[in-house]
Image: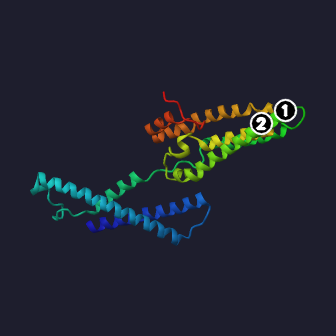
Amino acid sequence: MAFEKNSKETEVQDEKLAAEKEALLNEIKQTYGIEVPKEEAEEVVDDAVETTQETAEETAADTIADTVKDSESDSPQSESSDSSGEPGELTDEDLESSYNETISITAKEPLPKYGKCFAFVPIACGTTLLAVILGHIPPINMGIPSNSTIRYIYIGFGCLLAVLALLLIVNAIAEAHIYENIQMGKLVTTGVYSKTRNPIYAGVIFGCTGILFISGNAFMYVLPIIYWFLLTYMLINTEEVILRRRFGQDYKEYMQKTNRIAPIPKREE
C-alpha cells in the first residue's frame, strides 16, 4: 500500500512539473515573442527545479535537525526517532512540505507590464501631435509670438523639458530595470524611483510639454495642465489601488516619501 501511495504521489508531482514547464514555455513566448526549443527550455527548468529542490532540502534538513535536537533535549526517549526508528532521517513528506513552502515564499506573481494608466501615453502623445499641427494653422497660429527673443526662450525651455523627459524614461528602463523588476513582482523605490513614483509617465508629460513649447503656440500651453490632472486621476483610481493592495504598508510609506509625478524631493510633513 505504501508503494502504491508513493507511486501515485510521484505521478502527481511529474504532472505538476510538466504543467509548470508548459506554462514557462508559453510565458516566454508571450513575453518575448520567441519560440524556445522545447529541449532547451526543459533543461533550464530542470536545472532551476533541481537547484530549488537542493536549497529546499538543505533548509528542511537544518530545520528538522534543529527540531529533533530540541525534542531530544526535552524528551529523549519518545522524540528521538521518526516512524522508521532512525533519528534525524528526512521523510519524503518533510522534503515536499519544505520545498512547497520555499516556493510559496520566494515566488512572486509578476505585475502587469503595462498598467491600466498606460492608455495615458497614446492619449497625451496624440493630443500633442494634433495641437502642434493645429497650432500652425490660421487663425490659431496667432498664439505664436512674433518676437524672435521670446520664440527662442520657448524653444530653449522646450528643449530642457525634452532632455528631462528622456533622462527620466531612460533611467527608469535602463538603470532601474523596471520591466525586469515588474516580471519578478518587485516594488522599485531606488534610483529615479526615489525621485518620482512614476518616472515614465512623468517623462511623457514633460516630453509632450517640451514639444508644445518648441512649437511655440501659447494657446496650447493649457494642455500640460490637463495632462497632469488626467494622469493624477487615472493613477489614483487604478494603479495605486493595485499597488496598495499588493505591497500594503511598504507602498504607503513609499507614497509618503515620494511624489506621484514631479521628480523633486517631497516635503516632510
Q: Position of residue 237 (x, y in %)?
A: 58, 34
Label 1: which residue?
145
Label 2: which residue?
154
- How many C-alpha atoms fall within 10 Å of the one at disc 1: few (<14), some, or many (≥20)? some
Q: Position of residue 183 (x, y in %)?
A: 52, 53
Task: Tell me the residue at 78%/42% (across/down).
Answer: 129
Q: Amino acid at mark 1?
A: Pro
Q: Secondary structure at mark 1?
A: loop
**First along the sequence among labels 1 and 2:** 1
Q: Is residue 12 above or below residue 174?
A: below
- Is any atom of residue 256 visible in this view? yes
Task: Tell me the residue at 85%/36% (across/down).
Answer: 148
Q: Secondary structure at mark 2?
A: helix
Q: Amino acid at mark 2?
A: Tyr
Contact between marks 1 and 2 (CB within 8 A): the answer is yes
Indicate the quadrant where residue 262 lies. top right
